[in-house]
Image (cartoon, coloured by chain):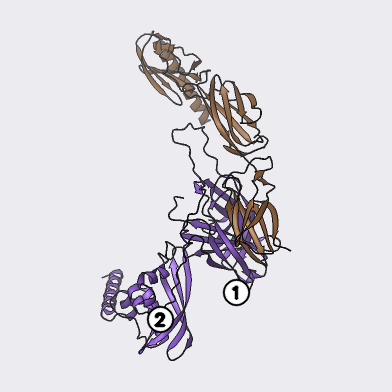
Chain colours: A purple, B brown
C-alpha cells in the first residue's frame, strides 16, 4: 500500500473516532445548541441567571427566555420578542445574537444589578445592545426583570405627502442607432483627501450630483505608482449614499487594505453615475448633532423621520472637516431599529482618537431603505 | 530575390490566364455602379461560364451565356464598396474590379445630438452630427448640404447649414437662457430627423430662507428657488437646512416641492439657521435675539 492510501485510512479512522466520542460524550454547550441537552447553570447567582438568559436568546429559545423572567406578567412574549427583534422590519429582524457579556454592578441579599452587553450580527455588520438588568431572588434562584423598551408610535393621523418621484424611459432595442439615450446624470467630486492609516490607504471625499435628475452613484479609485503603473483599483462600497437626488452631496470612502501612501505616485478618481428612478421621500432630519471630542470621540444625534412611512433601514454617514474645511474623516452607522414616523432615534458615530482634535465641523446625511416603497 | 521571382511567376500566370480568357470569353465591367440600381454586364465569346461578384457586403453568382449581357435587376447589388467580378470559363478565369457607390438621394438620416439634457446659457454646449444614408443604408460620401435648426419655446431659432464631408456633417449650438424642451432638427434632401434637448436650469441663485414659529417648532422655508436667469429650480432638488446653537447642530436634506423647500426644526432661541443647495449657500437667520 502506498503512503497516500495509508494516510487516507488514518484520516478516516481518526474522523470516525472523533465522531463517536463527540456523540457519546458531547460538550455541554454543543449539545444545548443542537437542542439535545442543557448548557444552563442553576440560577443560584445573579451572574448565572443573566448568563442563562443570554444563552436562551443566543439559541433563540424565546419561550424559555420569557418564562424565566421575573416580570413576565408586565408584558407578553410577543412584546418581549419584538423588543429584541424590532417592531417593524429592520436590521434586527434577521440579526442573531453573536455573543454577550454580563458585568455585575451591585448585589444585595434579594436584588442585584448587572449590565448585559449583547453583540448582534446583521447583514451589514454587528451592533451592540446594552441593557441594565435588575435581578430579584425568588426562593433559591435569581430571575431577571427585563427592561422592556417599547417603541413609540406616532398617533394616528394623516400626513399629506406631495409625492415626488422620477421615472425613466430608456432607449429601446428598436430605436435607430443614432437615437439618443437619456443622458447620465452629471456628478462631480467636490473634495478628495487620501490618508494613510494602519489598515491601509483610505481615500475620502465628497460627491455632488449637479444635475436636475436623480443618480445612482459610485466612485472608483486607482492608485498609480511612481512610474504611473496601476497598483490597485477599488470602488466605494457602502460608505457612500448611492442614490443622490439633484444637488445632493454624499461623502465617500474608498479603501485600499494593505497599501501604503508612500508607494503611491498619483491617484485616478472615476465618479460613476447612472440615471435611475427615485423618490424624493422620505425626508429624515438629523437633530441635535453634537461632536464630543474626547476622551472617546464621537458624534451623537437623533434621526427623525418626517414622512408618514416607516424607514426600515437607515444608514447615517457623517463627514468630518478640519478648520480649513478639509475632509479628515468619514464615519457611518447603520441604525438597527426601523425609523417610525416622527419618533426620534439616537445614533452615535465613533471617531478615531488621533483625528479627534483636528475636527472642527461635520455634516451628516442619511441614506434610507423602505420595504413598502417601490423605489 | 525570392520575392522578385514570386512576382514574376505571378505576372506570368496572370498573363497566361488572360491569354486563355481572351480566347474563350470577355466581359466589360463599368467602373462604377450605383447601389441598388439595375445594370448589365456585356460579355463576348462563345460557350457558357460563371460570373462571381464579391465585395465587402455581398457575393453574387450568375450563370453566363457568353455573347449575351448579364442582367442585374434593381436591388440585386446594393452594398457600397469595392468589388471584384470573376468570370470563369472552363479552366480559365478573368477578373475585373469595380465600385458600387451609394445613391445620391438620401433616404435616412442618423442624427446624434448630445447631450440630451443641458444647462441653460452655454455657448456651443449642444452638438449635432448627421450621417446621411441612401435607401440601402449606404453612407452617402458625396458632399450634401445638411441644415440644422435648434428651436426652443422662447427666443429665435438657431440655424446652420453644413455640407457633409465623407458622409457626415456636424455643428455646435448654444443653449438658450430659458428652460424647456428644445427641438433640434437635421434635414438633408427632404429627409429630417428630430431630437429633443432638455434645457434645464443652472445652479440656484440668491437662495433665501425665512422662519416662523409653529408651536414648539420653527417652520423654515425658502423663497421660490430660481437660477440666475430667473428659471425655477425643478422640484426634487435638495436644499440642506442647518440649525446650529452652542455646538449642537440639526440638519435636513429636503427636496423642493412646488418651488419651495420647507422643514420644521426645533425652535431654539439664539440658533443660527442656514440653507444651501449643492455648492450654493443661502442666507443665515439668527432666531430669537443675539
Instruction: Look at the picture and state if B229 lies above or below A246.
Output: above
Q: Disc 1 marks which residue?
A: A296
Crowding around mark 1 (Cα neighbors within 10 Å: few <14, some 14 to 19, many 20+) is few
Crowding around mark 2 (Cα neighbors within 10 Å: few <14, some 14 to 19, many 20+) is many
Residues B112 and A153: in front is A153
Residues B138 and B42: in front is B138
Task: Tell which residue pokes out farthest to the bottom in this image.
Answer: A109
Q: Disc 2 marks which residue?
A: A144
Tag 2 subunit:
A
Instruction: Please tell me in which quadrant of the rendered image residue A69 appears.
Output: bottom left
Closer to viewer: mark 1 or mark 2:
2
Percent position of residue B113, x then y: 57, 33
Percent position of residue A156, x then y: 46, 59
Task: Tell which residue pokes out farthest to the front in this image.
Answer: B215
Residues A52 and B107: in front is A52
Ranked by sequence position, the earlier of labels 1 and 2 is 2
Instruction: Look at the picture and state if B145 lies above or below A164.
Output: above
Q: Is residue A21 visible?
A: yes
Instruction: Please tell me in which quadrant of the rendered image residue B53 appears.
Output: top left
Instruction: Please tell me in which quadrant of the rendered image residue A46 appears.
Output: bottom left
Secondary structure beneath disc 2?
Answer: strand
Residues A113 and B83: in front is A113
Residue B126's disc number: none
Q: Can residue B251 be seen in this view?
A: no
| Alpha carbon distance from label 1 to label 2 | 31 Å
Percent position of residue B275, x then y: 65, 54
Amino acid at each position: 500500500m502506498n503512503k497516500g492510501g495509508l494516510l487516507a485510512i488514518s484520516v478516516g479512522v481518526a474522523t470516525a473516532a472523533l465522531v463517536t466520542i463527540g456523540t457519546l460524550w458531547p460538550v455541554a454547550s454543543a449539545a444545548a445548541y443542537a437542542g439535545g441537552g442543557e448548557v444552563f447553570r442553576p440560577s443560584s447567582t445573579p451572574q448565572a441567571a443573566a448568563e442563562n438568559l443570554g444563552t436562551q436568546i443566543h439559541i433563540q429559545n424565546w419561550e424559555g427566555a420569557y418564562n424565566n423572567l421575573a416580570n413576565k406578567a408586565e408584558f407578553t412574549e410577543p412584546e418581549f420578542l419584538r423588543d429584541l427583534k424590532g417592531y417593524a422590519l429592520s436590521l434586527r429582524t434577521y440579526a442573531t445574537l453573536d455573543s454577550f457579556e454580563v458585568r455585575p454592578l451591585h448585589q444585595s441579599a434579594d436584588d442585584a444589578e448587572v449590565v448585559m452587553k449583547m453583540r448582534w450580527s446583521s447583514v451589514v455588520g454587528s451592533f451592540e445592545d446594552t441593557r441594565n438588568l435588575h435581578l430579584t431572588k425568588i426562593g433559591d434562584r435569581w430571575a431577571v426583570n427585563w427592561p422592556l423598551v417599547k417603541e413609540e408610535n406616532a398617533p394616528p393621523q394623516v400626513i399629506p405627502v406631495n409625492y415626488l418621484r422620477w421615472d425613466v424611459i430608456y432607449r429601446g432595442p428598436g430605436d435607430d442607432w443614432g437615437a439618443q439615450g437619456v443622458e447620465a446624470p452629471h456628478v462631480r467630486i467636490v473634495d478628495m483627501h487620501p490618508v494613510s492609516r494602519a489598515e491601509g490607504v483610505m481615500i475620502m471625499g465628497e460627491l455632488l450630483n449637479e444635475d436636475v435628475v436623480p443618480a445612482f452613484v459610485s466612485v472608483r479609485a486607482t492608485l498609480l505608482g511612481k512610474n504611473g503603473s496601476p497598483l490597485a483599483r477599488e470602488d466605494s462600497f457602502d460608505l457612500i449614499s448611492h442614490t443622490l437626488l439633484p444637488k445632493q452631496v454624499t461623502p465617500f470612502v474608498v479603501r485600499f487594505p494593505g497599501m501604503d501612501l508612500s508607494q503611491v505616485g498619483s491617484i485616478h478618481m472615476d465618479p460613476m453615475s447612472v440615471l435611475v428612478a427615485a423618490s424624493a421621500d422620505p425626508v429624515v432630519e438629523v437633530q441635535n448633532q453634537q461632536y464630543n471630542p474626547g476622551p472617546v470621540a464621537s458624534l451623537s444625534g437623533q434621526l427623525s423621520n418626517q414622512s408618514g412611512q416607516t424607514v426600515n433601514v437607515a444608514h447615517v454617514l457623517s463627514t468630518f472637516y478640519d478648520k480649513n474645511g478639509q475632509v479628515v474623516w468619514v464615519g457611518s452607522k447603520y441604525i438597527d431599529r426601523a425609523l417610525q414616523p416622527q419618533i426620534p432615534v439616537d445614533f452615535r458615530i465613533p471617531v478615531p482618537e488621533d483625528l479627534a482634535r483636528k475636527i472642527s465641523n461635520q455634516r451628516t446625511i442619511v441614506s434610507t431603505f423602505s420595504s413598502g416603497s417601490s423605489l | 530575390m525570392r520575392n522578385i521571382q514570386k512576382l514574376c511567376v505571378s505576372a506570368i500566370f496572370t498573363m497566361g490566364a488572360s491569354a486563355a480568357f481572351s480566347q474563350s470569353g470577355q466581359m466589360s465591367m463599368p467602373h462604377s455602379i450605383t447601389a441598388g440600381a439595375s445594370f448589365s454586364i456585356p460579355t463576348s465569346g462563345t460557350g457558357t461560364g460563371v460570373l462571381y461578384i464579391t465585395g465587402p457586403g455581398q457575393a453574387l453568382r450568375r450563370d453566363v451565356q457568353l455573347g449575351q449581357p448579364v442582367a442585374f435587376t434593381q436591388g440585386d447589388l446594393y452594398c457600397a464598396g469595392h468589388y471584384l467580378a470573376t468570370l470563369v470559363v472552363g479552366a480559365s478565369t478573368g477578373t475585373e474590379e469595380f465600385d458600387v457607390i451609394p445613391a445620391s438621394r438620401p433616404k435616412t438620416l442618423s442624427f446624434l445630438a448630445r447631450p440630451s439634457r443641458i444647462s441653460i446659457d452655454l455657448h456651443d454646449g449642444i452638438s449635432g452630427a448627421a450621417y446621411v444614408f441612401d435607401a440601402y443604408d449606404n453612407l452617402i460620401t458625396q458632399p450634401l448640404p445638411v441644415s440644422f435648426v435648434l428651436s426652443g419655446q422662447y427666443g429665435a431659432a438657431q440655424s446652420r447649414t453644413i455640407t457633409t464631408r465623407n458622409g457626415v456633417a456636424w455643428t455646435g449650438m448654444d443653449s438658450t437662457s430659458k428652460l424647456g424642451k428644445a427641438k433640434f432638427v437635421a434635414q438633408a434632401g427632404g429627409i429630417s430627423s428630430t431630437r429633443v434637448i432638455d434645457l434645464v436650469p443652472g445652479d440656484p441663485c440668491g437662495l433665501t430662507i425665512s422662519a416662523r414659529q409653529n408651536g414648539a417648532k420653527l417652520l423654515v422655508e425658502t423663497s421660490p428657488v430660481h437660477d440666475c436667469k430667473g428659471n425655477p429650480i425643478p422640484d426634487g432638488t435638495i436644499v440642506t437646512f442647518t440649525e446650529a446653537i452652542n455646538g449642537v447642530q440639526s440638519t435636513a436634506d429636503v427636496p423642493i416641492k412646488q418651488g419651495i423647500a420647507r422643514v420644521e426644526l426645533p425652535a431654539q432661541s439664539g440658533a443660527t439657521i442656514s440653507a444651501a443647495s449643492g455648492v450654493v449657500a443661502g442666507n443665515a437667520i439668527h432666531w430669537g435675539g443675539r
